[in-house]
């Protein structure tokens, strides 16, 4: 797979509506290569719609979307060869074993020696011992690891993970976090959507908060923390958490704080 120069993902002026409902209202951001970019937002913020556009499953109403150097509107086939998408629910075949799932995907990708490819992915994702078991018997974390392994069979340079830990228990979440870190360590660009604040804190190089179809802020964790007033020293010193930043921007009830032309730095959240 050819990897182009420049950002792995570039989105400019992206808009999408369903009849009178405006889901995305001029979204702009870039994702550097080999990084983990977290798109954080509540249910209904537009995260899944954005991922579906990035992966060519939806056409945008306006704006430009470039993935791995290809335009999603005019070069959709090239985009699809550059990416892999893992949705909110594991897309594994429960009747097949873990190894059979991987062999099937390798054959569909027309790869040479599907068995060898499957064995390599099983080892990479610590599933070798469970390779002969039906996927139905896997834990939530194991199923998600298998799902991601299936997505990476052809080594795409960009992977979209849409709510990858939704519904998982704490151990399953930690397993998926390790997989995501390992992907970035190998140079894969990861765009991660999540509504879990701690997940974005733990994994992302950069974090964007999507609210009501708009990007409110986009930066590193330290940059987002700096949007709130400096911590007050009383008994202990405490930096604002990502949760503080999130609620200060979108409001406790999911609406942006009232008031015109006020700076983000003046918004605080009572704790």
Image (spheres, helix red, strand yellow):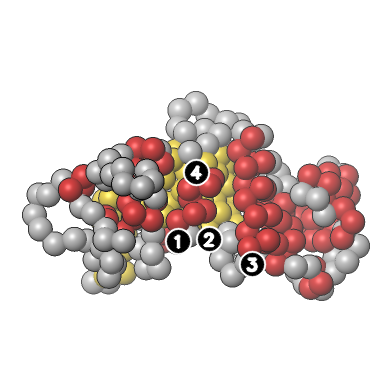
Q: Which residue is drawn at 67% across and 48% down?
A: 179
Comes first in the chain, label 2 or label 3: 2
x and y percentages locating residue 260 in the rendered image = 8, 54
* Pair 2/1: label in front: 1
Comes first in the chain, label 2 or label 1: 2
Q: What element carries label 1?
A: loop
How far is disc 4 from disc 1 in space, using C-alphas? 13 Å
Disc 2 crowd, CA 10 A, few/some/many (<14, 14-19, 20+): many
Residue farthest toward the top in the current orientation of the protein? 5
Q: Is mark 3 on a helix, strand or loop?
A: loop
Query: Which quadrant of the structure image shows residue 42?
Result: bottom left
Asked if the residue under mark 1 is in contact with the one under mark 4, i.e. CB atoms within 8 Å, the reply is: no
Q: Residue at x 74, y 58 (%)?
A: 146
Q: Which of 106 and 229 is in front in this view?
A: 229
Residue 195: give its label: 1
How far is disc 4 from disc 3 in space, using C-alphas? 20 Å
How far is disc 2 from disc 1 in space, using C-alphas? 8 Å
x and y percentages locating residue 216 in the rendered image = 28, 50
Q: Is residue 184 left or right of residue 50?
A: right
Comes first in the chain, label 4 or label 3: 3
x and y percentages locating residue 115 in the rendered image = 88, 49
Instruction: Give the labeled residue for mark 4.
Output: 204
Q: Nearer the viewer, residue 256 or 265?
A: 265
Residue 163: give its label: 2
């Amino acid at each position: 797979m050819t990897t182009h120069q420049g950002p792995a993902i570039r989105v400019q002026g992206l808009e999408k509506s369903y009849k009178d409902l405006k889901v995305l209202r001029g979204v702009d951001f870039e994702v550097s290569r080999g990084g983990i970019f977290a798109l954080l937002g509540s249910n209904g913020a537009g995260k899944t719609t954005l991922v579906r556009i990035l992966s060519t499953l939806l056409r945008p109403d306006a704006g430009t979307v470039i993935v791995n150097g290809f335009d999603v509107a005019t070069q959709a086939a090239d985009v699809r060869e550059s990416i892999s998408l893992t949705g909110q629910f594991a897309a594994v075949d429960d009747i097949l074993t873990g190894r059979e799932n991987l062999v099937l995907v390798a054959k569909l990708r027309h790869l040479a020696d599907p068995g060898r490819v499957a064995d390599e992915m099983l080892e990479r994702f610590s599933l070798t011992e469970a390779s002969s078991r039906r996927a139905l018997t896997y834990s939530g974390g194991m199923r998600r690891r298998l799902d991601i392994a299936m997505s990476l069979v052809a080594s795409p340079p960009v992977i979209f993970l849409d709510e990858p830990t939704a519904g998982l228990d704490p151990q399953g979440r930690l397993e998926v976090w390790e997989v995501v870190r390992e992907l970035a360590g190998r140079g894969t660009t990861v765009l991660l959507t999540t509504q879990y604040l701690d997940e974005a804190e733990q994994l992302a190089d950069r974090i964007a908060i999507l609210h009501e179809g708009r990007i409110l802020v986009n930066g590193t964790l330290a940059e987002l923390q700096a949007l709130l007033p400096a911590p007050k020293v009383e008994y202990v010193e405490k930096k604002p958490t990502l949760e503080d930043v999130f609620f200060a921007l979108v409001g406790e009830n999911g609406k942006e704080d009232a008031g015109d032309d006020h700076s983000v730095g003046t918004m605080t959240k009572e704790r």
